[in-house]
């Protein structure tokens, strides 16, 4: 693989083994580089979740229904899901520093355009652009962060990177709720502009002389078309499935058929194409395969419960969006504190043991939540959330280390892009399955409860008589009782899911033991792969 425009900066001879391999950054350059990369990642991750709680406000202001307003989320998710796995190919074509910097600047521009939107159609269009340019940011930040640190500190580099990725989705809903309550919704997009411009400028100043080699590869048009087709159809199916009653809808059935056919053709084409748009041969690497499969499935189960908790708090317990965000905020505390410690532990300990501990902790947290009821206080809700921060740090950092260990430097951007793509895909699966199960189980529990709570039962008759005695009409009293049944039904359904998640986390422990990481301090060093 040759480069026509990338020349490594002077470095010791051992670092000149191949073009684009540089000595680690030192001192202030490394510190400022870490801040610039982390800021860009935080902005991206934050933006993927910040709009969620603002949908009712945006929909109302643009004169559309909340259901139509969800296209603001769907459009971003579809475009983002398509471009994340393209990171490896785009990096080879344009260079990772150029691509990363350009993505930040375009993300800032598209954010400004989103805030400036005058209709739902214009907002959805600009969100598609925003989602597309955001795709390479997370995997490339991971690759650049690893290249900035000496190989013995690769675990620490991944820990610092993980902190921003873990905390962003928690802060997003909280910040989005506050902005929607106190300012106009446009500011959830405008705040990205100064942050993005500063981050882009700083990244270019620090990394412009550390560009990766560029190769003018032919465009795999058929592979790209198949990728857009199956990923777009799958993301639409997952986002709209619950709304359209899943396979009772002909639209969902059609999308499912398109996904299966396009995915099969995509896999066959990419494995036989000389210059594939996505390098699927990465899955033949044992550690990459085991790491990606483990983190993706665990993330799917984890993210389903993350989405469920605020939905249950707001829809069943009557919390505001801001209060639900506050209840979720403690997850960042232990994640921030423990991430650097986990990074250091990886230099001396087998990462599989740390991941096993994370799964046990996730299981414990879900069992704690399985004891929730309608009388639960916010402090009781916050306690497992606080502990969850430790489990997140113990899961994502070691699994990222395992996934990237032993890979050649030029494959790391593609590997990071592909692993993030699969993880996000399973997160979408987890969200759809969890929310659908929650409503279906609630319907079941409601039916079972109404068999007991009905006229002729002493408790029901006493409650109705008491409410009517207080001045409520028969219909109003029946409505109050039905609301109480709904509250219990949705709570019982949430508890079912928490309990099921606890058991699943225990079964998932076995997956990580298919990996075979190195048995010495080079475990985290090999993850860097760029020195």
Image (cartoon, rainbow, N blue to C red):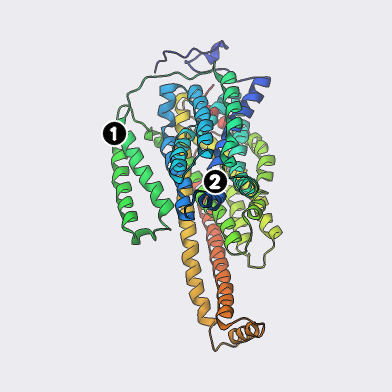
- Horizontal side of 502 relative to 432 (left or right) equals right
Which residue is pictured at 57% across the width and 11% down the height? 12
Q: Which label sits in the foreground, 1 or 2?
A: 2
Question: Which sits in the foreground, 322 or 181?
Answer: 181
Please tell me whether residue 89 is drawn above or below residue 394 in the rendered image.
above
Disc 2 element: loop
Task: Give the image location of residue 25, x and y in percent.
Answer: 62, 20
Residue appearing at x 62%, y 35% in the figure: 159
Tally the marks.
2
Residue that badge 1 annotates: 222
Q: Residues under labels 1 and 2: Cα distance?
A: 33 Å
Looking at the picture, tell me which residue is in the foreground, 261 or 238: 238
Mark 2 packing: few (<14 Cα in 10 Å), some, or many (20+)?
many
Residue 225, above or below 300: above
Q: Quadrant of the N terminus?
A: top left
**Above or below for 194 versus 94:** below
Q: Nearer the viewer, residue 261 or 454?
A: 454
User: Callout 1: few (<14), some (14-19), or many (20+) C-alpha neighbours within 10 Å?
Assistant: some
Q: Is residue 529 above or below residue 343?
A: above
Query: Does residue 330 appear in the picture of this structure?
Result: yes
Task: First in sequence, mark 1 or 2: give its number.
Answer: 2
Extreme residue toward the right, this view: 379
Quadrant of the snapshot with the C terminus: top right
Answer whether residue 354 is visible to the viewer in this image: no
Residue 250 screen position, x and y as percent: 31, 57
Q: Please report the residue visible at 55 percent of the width from the left and 80 percent of the height from the top.
A: 475
Is disc 1 placed on a helix, strand or loop? Answer: helix
**Residue 344 placed where, x, y %?**
66, 34
The percent coordinates of residue 206 (x first, y second) are 59, 19
Please give the residue where the numbered disc 2 appears in the rendered image: 51
């Amino acid at each position: 693989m040759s480069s026509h425009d990338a020349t490594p900066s002077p470095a010791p001879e051992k670092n000149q083994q191949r073009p684009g391999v540089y000595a680690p950054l030192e001192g202030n350059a490394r510190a400022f580089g870490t801040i610039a990369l982390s800021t860009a990642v935080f902005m991206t991750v934050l933006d993927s979740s910040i709009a969620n709680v603002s949908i009712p406000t945006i929909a109302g202001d643009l004169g559309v229904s909340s259901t139509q307003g969800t296209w603001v989320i769907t459009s971003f998710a579809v475009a983002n899901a398509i471009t994340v796995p393209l990171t490896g190919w785009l990096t080879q074509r344009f260079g990772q520093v150029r691509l990363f910097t350009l993505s930040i600047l375009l993300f800032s521009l598209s954010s400004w355009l989103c805030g400036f939107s005058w209709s739902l159609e214009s907002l959805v269009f600009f969100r598609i652009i925003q989602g597309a340019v955001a795709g390479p940011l997370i995997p490339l930040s991971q690759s650049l962060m690893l290249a900035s640190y000496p190989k013995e500190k690769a675990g620490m580099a991944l820990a610092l990177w993980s902190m921003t990725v873990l905390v962003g989705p928690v802060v997003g809903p909280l910040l989005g709720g506050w902005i929607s309550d106190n300012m106009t919704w446009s500011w959830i997009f405008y705040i990205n502009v100064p942050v993005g411009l500063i981050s882009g400028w700083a990244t270019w100043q620090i990394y412009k002389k550390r560009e990766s080699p560029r190769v003018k590869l032919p465009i795999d048009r058929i592979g790209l078309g198949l990728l857009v087709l199956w990923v777009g159809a799958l993301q639409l199916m997952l986002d709209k499935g619950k709304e359209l009653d899943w396979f009772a809808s002909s639209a969902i059935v059609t999308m499912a058929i398109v996904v299966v056919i396009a995915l099969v053709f995509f896999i066959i084409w990419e494995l036989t194409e000389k210059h594939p748009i996505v390098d699927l041969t990465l899955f033949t690497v044992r550690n990459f395969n085991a790491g990606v499969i483990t983190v993706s499935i665990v993330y799917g189960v984890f993210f389903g419960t993350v989405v469920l908790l605020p939905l249950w708090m707001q829809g069943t317990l009557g919390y505001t969006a801001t209060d639900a965000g506050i209840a979720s905020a403690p997850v960042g505390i232990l994640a921030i504190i423990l991430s650097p410690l986990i990074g250091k532990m990886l230099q001396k300990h087998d990462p599989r043991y740390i991941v096993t501990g994370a799964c046990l902790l996730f299981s414990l947290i879900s069992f704690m939540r399985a004891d929730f009821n309608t009388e639960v206080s916010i402090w009781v809700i916050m306690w497992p959330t606080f502990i969850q921060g430790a489990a997140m740090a113990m899961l994502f950092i070691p699994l990222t280390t395992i996934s990237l260990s032993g890979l050649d430097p030029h494959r790391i951007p593609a590997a990071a892009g592909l692993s993030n793509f699969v993880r996000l895909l399973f997160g979408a699966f987890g969200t759809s399955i969890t929310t659908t199960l929650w409503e279906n189980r609630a319907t079941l529990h409601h039916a079972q409860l109404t068999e007991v709570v009905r006229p002729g039962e002493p408790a029901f008759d006493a409650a109705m008589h008491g409410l009517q005695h207080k001045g409520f009409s028969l219909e109003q009293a029946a409505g109050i009782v039905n609301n109480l049944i709904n509250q219990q039904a949705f709570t019982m359904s949430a508890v079912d899911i928490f309990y099921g998640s606890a058991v699943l986390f225990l079964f998932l422990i076995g997956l990580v033991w298919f990996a075979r990481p190195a048995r010495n301090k080079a475990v985290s060093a090999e993850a860097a792969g760029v020195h």
